[in-house]
Amino acid sequence: MSALTGQLQNGILHSVSAPKYQQIRADLEARIHSGELPPGARLPTEAELQGQYGVSRATAQRTLDDLARAGLAVRYRRRGTFVASGSQQTNLLRFVDTRRIGPEVHGPHVVLSARVVPARDAGVAMPGVDDDTPVNQLRRIKYDERDNPLGIELSAVPFALAPHLFDEDLEQLTFLPYFHRVGIPVSTSRMYIEPDVLDQATADLLHCESGTPVLRLRRETWLVNGQLAEARWDIVRPDIAKFFIESSVLRTNS
């Protein structure tokens, strides 16, 4: 029995850092999502990753293979590895993890409307909020890095909670980091995945046919005191966006 196996069986090994290939993949994935490495861009070779990160060839190879399995890259024998030009892949956990920073969906946001309305007119269910309560309602269209319309987002936040929300740069605003930045004590988020079909107005905005089946991602974010901080939904084009769920299964001290 190896020393590592013995440690595992005895419960001594309680915490490990992320494997090196996962750390390198996270670096490359961030560059892909930021647009630094656009679709079709060549990724570093195995030899280049070895030199840059000081890892073995096997680790470099696993990193690139892992990106390919996630649909983020395409590997060609003798030609190299390139950023995939197909559907955008997004980890659904980005929509609900209050610890994450950066946009849930990468690419430009264009504001369609920003107004204060009664909760009854918010366009999204707001559990525990009285119908007459003023809320900030923000509606935006999202684009991918290639300027394809990707989806429509509608968010509603109680006005008393964020009275200066519309003073922000609304095209760049990401709600969960905003809550942390201004000291709004958010605690948990829950997302519901619901089937829907596009009405004509929404279909026109997304360059789709009316009646196209889509996913509606509905999120509720709650304060530490149990009150609602934000309710929102996203309607996403199925021909451009593909979603997955990926989370670390490394054992940690907790």
Image (spheres, helix red, strand yellow):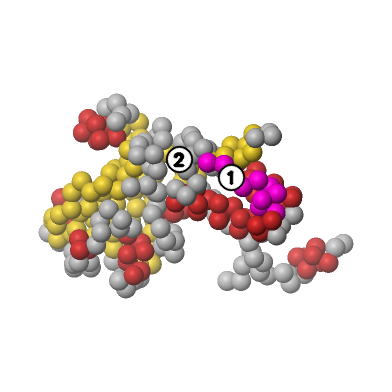
Please state if 188 lies on the left or on the right of 16 as rendered: left
What x and y, as percent, mark residue 150?
35, 39
The answer to whether any part of residue 142 appears in the image is: yes
At label 1, the amino acid type is: Leu
Rate crowding at label 2 as few (under 14), some (14 to 19) or many (20 or more) other CA atoms within 10 Å: many
In this rendering, would 170 be left or right of 146?
A: left
Q: Which mark is first along the chain, 2 or 1?
A: 1
Image quarter of the C terminus: bottom right
Q: Gap between marks 1 and 2, in whole Å? A: 17 Å
Q: Please state which amino acid type lies under the numbered disc 2.
A: Gln
The residue positioned 14% from the left and 57% from the top of the image is 116
Given this view, does label 1 or label 2 mark the residue nearer the observer?
Answer: 1
Residue lying farthest to the right in this orientation: 1
Q: Please state the horizontal and vertical placement of residue 223, each as a whole percent of the image.
A: 33, 67
Please say if 200 is above or below 41. Answer: above
Q: Secondary structure at mark 1?
A: loop
Taking the spot 31% from the left edge, 29% from the top edge, the residue there is: 208
How many numbered circles are shown?
Answer: 2
Which stretch is magenta? 41-50
Asked which quadrant contains residue 229, the reply is bottom left
Query: The N terminus appears in which quarter of the rendering?
Result: bottom right
Residue shown at 40%/43% (left/top)? 145
* Quarter holding residue 16: bottom right
Q: SS of the residue at dot 2?
A: strand
**Residue 127, horizontal then vertical, whole percent:** 26, 57
**Which residue in the protein does label 2 denote?**
88
Give the answer, above or below, for where 128 lies relative to 71: below
Above or below — where is 115 with respect to 84? below
- Is residue 127 inside the magenta stretch? no
Name the residue that disc number 1 marks. 43
